[in-house]
Amino acid sequence: MPGTMGTLVAIPFSLALNRIAVNNFPLAVLIVVGSTLCAIWLSTKGAVILKQKDPQLIVIDEIVGFLVANFLAPPRLTALLWSFGLFRFFDTTKVFPTNRLEQLPGGAGIVLDDIMAGLYALIGLRLLLMLGWA
């Protein structure tokens, strides 16, 4: 449940990022990369403080993962719902190589598996958009 809540929290950030991306694509990419690096650092610190490998309390990984999943999605409810569903599916199923990324040490393992899940969801959404289903 924390992962789903983290993804819900990510929605307004994702919508704002997409508005930025329309006008300034390089800035939007920089925001995603910077957010990912900050999330790795913060997740590393949080895991040390909580003395857990991947604490459920940490949801910044879902936030940055969803930024990737919904990146440049059209501002339509159907696209948002598909992004959300696909991201949650790939985040929970850990399709290869997501399961390998999860084994990386510290914050890298906490965050990069969600980035990979976001990439899978992004590809899935693009296919659905091409088919006219989203």
Image: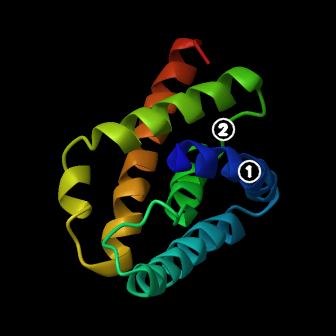
**62 above or below 86?**
below
Res. 71 in view = no
Question: Image quarter for residue 96?
Answer: top left
Is disc 1 placed on a helix, strand or loop?
helix
Dot 1 amino acid type: Asn
Residue 73: assigned label: 2
The residue lying at 26 percent from left, 61 percent from top is: 102
30 left or right, relative to 48: right
Locate residue 13, reporting x and y percent.
75, 56
Quarter of the figure that contains the C terminus: top right
Q: How is the image coloured?
A: rainbow
Distance, label 2 to label 1, CA atoms, is 7 Å
The x and y percentages for residue 62 are: 52, 55
Amino acid under disc 2: Ala
Q: Earlier in the sequence, mark 2 or mark 1?
A: 1
Q: Is residue 26 visible?
A: yes
From the viewer's perspective, tell me whether residue 55 is left or right of residue 76.
Answer: left
Which disc number belongs to residue 79?
Answer: none
Q: Secondary structure at mark 2?
A: loop
* Local crowd size for mark 1, using a 10 Å CA cut-off: few (<14), some (14–19), many (≥20): many
Q: Is residue 43 above or below residue 114?
A: below
Residue 4 drawn at (x, y percent): 56, 42
- Residue 42's place in the image compared with 117, above or below, is below
In front of the other: 24 or 116: 116
Q: Mark 1 = which residue?
A: 18
Q: Marks 2 and 1: CB-CB under 8 Å?
A: yes
